[in-house]
Image (cartoon, rainbow, N blue to C red):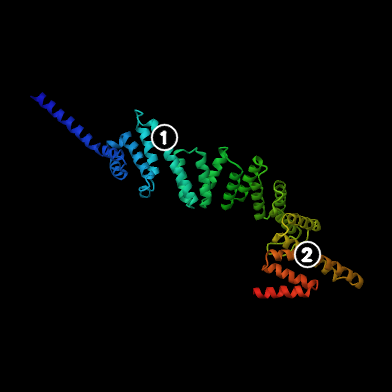
Amino acid sequence: MLIRSRIVFLCALVILSFSMAFAQKAKLREAKSFCNKLPPDYEQAKLAIDTAIVDDVTKSIAETWYYRGIIYSGFFTDVNLKSKCNSCLFTAYESFLTAEELDKKNEYLLEIESKLIPSVRQHIFEQAVGQFQSGEYDQALNTFEFILKKTPEEMAAIQNAAICAENAGNYPKAIIYYKSLIDKKNADNKTYVSLAKSMLHTNDTSGALGVLINGKKLFPDSADLILTEINIYLAMKRAEEALVAINDAIKKDASNVSLYLVKGSLNESLAKPADKDGNLLPAPKNQKELLALAKEAYGQGLTIDPNHFELNYNMGALIFNEATEMENAANAIANEAQFKLAKEKCKSVYLTAEPFLEKALAASPEDPGTLNSLKLLYFRINETDKYNAVKKKLDSLH
């Protein structure tokens, strides 16, 4: 009797255990049923699968996570449900990865690796691109970083994460990702430019210059690298090094008018150095040569764009200042005949400045600086009618 009772008791335990397991798997079966309907009822399937993944029995079954991935990816692809689950793609992706880990019999492995994970990854990538195009740079960065957590060597994700971080103003992260591209030998000239600019935003000027120098070794014909280098030298007030870089840039892009403008301005600043308060310092010995180079640069730019405002203004101003210095020197001449001759030469130089300043005014008719310069010029060369017209225009602007 004792033995028989024990057998009955054990049978009861087996039945009870089977019943409990059957009940625990009910939510998984329910989720599968809703998922396999035509059309699928993903909302009800989600309710069931969310219960199944916290159950001690079903959470350790590959099938549970496989269906969770199917259901959550279904939410994203269903236009009526997509807005109800912002992180569905992330959840689907992680679910398929968990299913892979638990799938000891390889029942789902082939489908997950060859179809499901690539499909979800593509949707995640497209979502990140959409966020970027909408100006949601922080969200796009988070999405690309999710991809990188799963596939840290994916070059497209690293590159896009860098661009998103830079646009979001997250320069430390942008630096990390741009450096990663360079370390992995997957960088172009724009990568070096973007890294340098990001470093400038963190006040690492010397580091930015180093990046550009390394970039130029690999991409010696890149105008973008040279222009960025020029801007850094200008910001650091290293005019002579900027000039070297500008001359290199002109060799690569001889039709870039801005290069001639900057080249002329730099030569002028070297010819007439000033302290931090704007007070003129002693003129360098090669001042005339530097001013001639400035005039030459402005002239080269004007052959490309004859109506360029700043080139015309700078050329006119340079010549006007040259005439003013000649006039100051003439005023010190005691001999009347020599004085008159010197004054005539001054006037001829003033007249040379006139067409440039007038073209600058034509390009920007209400620019106060140009109007004032012309007013002074017309006074110096006794152009009364033009003087009065410019004065009237200036008065109307006040």
> From the viewer's perspective, is 280 left or right of 27?
right
The amino acid sitting under disc 2 is Ala
Residue drawn at point x = 67 percent, y = 54 percent: 234
Indicate the position of residue 390 as horizontal and vertical percent values. 72, 72
Mark 2 neighbour density, 10 Å: few (under 14) some (14–19) many (20 or more): many
CA gap between label 2 and label 1 equals 73 Å
Q: Which mark is residue 378?
A: none
> From the viewer's perspective, is 122 left or right of 236?
left
Question: Label 1 belongs to which residue?
Answer: 115
Point out the image quarter for the C terminus: bottom right
> Given contact means CB atoms under 8 Å apart, are the residues at marks 2 and 1 in contact?
no
Numbered marks: total: 2
The amino acid sitting under disc 1 is Lys
Residue drawn at point x = 68 percent, y = 62 percent: 276
Indicate the position of residue 251 as horizontal and vertical percent values. 72, 46
Q: Secondary structure at mark 1?
A: helix
209 shown above or below 184: below
Residue drawn at point x = 10 percent, y = 24 percent: 4
Quarter of the rendering containing residue 359: bottom right
Quarter of the rendering containing residue 357: bottom right
Answer whether residue 238 is visible to the viewer in this image: no
Mark 1 neighbour density, 10 Å: few (under 14) some (14–19) many (20 or more): few
> From the viewer's perspective, is 398 left or right of 61?
right
Foreground of the two, 74 or 185: 74
Point out the image quarter for the N terminus: top left
Indicate the position of residue 95 as horizontal and vertical percent values. 36, 39
Residue drawn at point x = 76 percent, y = 58 percent: 271
Indicate the position of residue 315 as horizontal and vertical percent values. 75, 61
Question: Label 2 belongs to which residue?
Answer: 353
Answer whether residue 312 is visible to the viewer in this image: yes
Q: Marks 2 and 1: which is nearer the front?
A: 1
